[in-house]
Amino acid sequence: MVIELYAFACGVRDLPENCGAAQLGHVAAVFGPAGGDTRDDAIRHGLVVQALVDMCAAVLPVRFGERFTEVTALVDAVTPRLHELEDRLAAVDGCVELAVRIARAAPVRSDGTAYMQAGLQASRAATTLHALLQERARAAVVAQSPLLHDACYLVARGDVDDFAHRVAAYGVEHPELDLVCTGPWAPASFAEAAA
Amino acid sequence: MTALAEQVTLVELVDRVLHKGVVIAGDVTLSVAGVDLVYLGLRVLLASVASLEEEW
Amino acid sequence: MTRVLAAQGEVPVPAPAMPRRVSVDSETVERGLAQLVLTLVELLRQLMERQALRRMDAGTLTDDEVERLGDTFMKLADRMDELKEHFRLRDEDLNLDLGPLGRLL
């Protein structure tokens, strides 16, 4: 039976329905029967990973599509990387991921110079918000993006509400920004060691 | 959650699952339906345009 | 539970990673292609705008250049809105089927 790898975890209290775990030392490799390759399957994968966040102390999501013919094949593939996985799990222990994306709000249509100046103001506001949020996060990953700002922050579970309020409050002070903060996500952006 | 918020969350969920997370390289490869390449291709282009940006 | 924690204005969303179904009829193919093309143009516009803003911030653009660039970006943005409107993409590209989500919950 082909299996699909969902995530690595520590401190597993419970598992979602139809999931099993291969224990490698302290690290549990959570798997389930492999499904198809459709968007619905991708959604299901994501929902299982999210469910694990509430069931385990630390979760390291695995990308969609990691399949193995059987558990022993999974164990063989994972064992060489066990030490690295333990380190990554320790790094995200007790934390979740919050995504923040910022774009410039629909600008006033007057002249080109005003348009650019408003853009510059928005760009600077986004940079300042990032600096503020970085102080409240254990780590941050900033993506290359056409947006003004596109980043994920590793935040302690207890700090999530405060973090979200800060984003909302900053938005109110800066109507020139369109922004969104989503989460709490399993820390998929922090799953691979920093390049 | 409003319908729009749900949609945003779902789109982001799929995006994360496809592009983020540990890669192990299982011995059964994910076969990507041909239609998905249109969007995966866009993502690859995004990465290459972003690196082009460094040269500007 | 994963949700939108804070939002203001037009929420930036990552490009839809997987379309719901394979396009077979010509109208759907045309719209899919239009969506791709417009997404790319929008992407390039935003990248160019960011680059221009960086130069403006660094003081390496003349006032005339700032005015002309801003004017171009504004007009391009307006044109993009018109085209999106024409292909009715604003609503449909985020129209996701929540069927399996319902079952899983």
Image (cartoon, coloured by chain):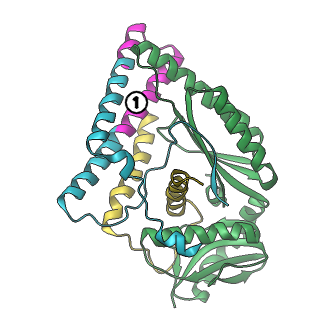
Residue farthest along the left direction in this orientation: C26
Q: Quadrant of residue B16?
A: bottom right
Task: Give the colour of chain B.
Answer: yellow
In the image, the segment drawn in magenta is C42-69
The image position of residue A156, as x and y in percent, is 78, 53
Q: Amino acid at mark 1?
A: Met
Q: Is residue C44 magenta?
A: yes
Q: Is residue C58 left or right of residue A99?
A: left
Q: Horizontal and vertical percent for residue C63?
A: 42, 8
Please give the letter of the chain rendered in green.
Answer: A
Colour in which chain C is drawn = cyan
Q: Residue, x 44% and y 47% (percent of image)?
A: B47
Task: Assess whether residue B42 is covered by the magenta stretch.
Answer: no
Looking at the image, residue C35 lies above or below residue A174: below
Task: Check disc 1 and report the residue beneath it.
Answer: C48
- Our reading of the magenta stretch's main secondary structure is helix
Q: Is residue C86 visible in this depiction of the protein? A: yes
Identify the element where label 1 is drawn. Answer: helix
Q: How many marks?
A: 1
Counting other residues with Cα less than 10 Å from the Cα at mark 1, is it few (<14), some (14-19), or many (20 or more)?
some
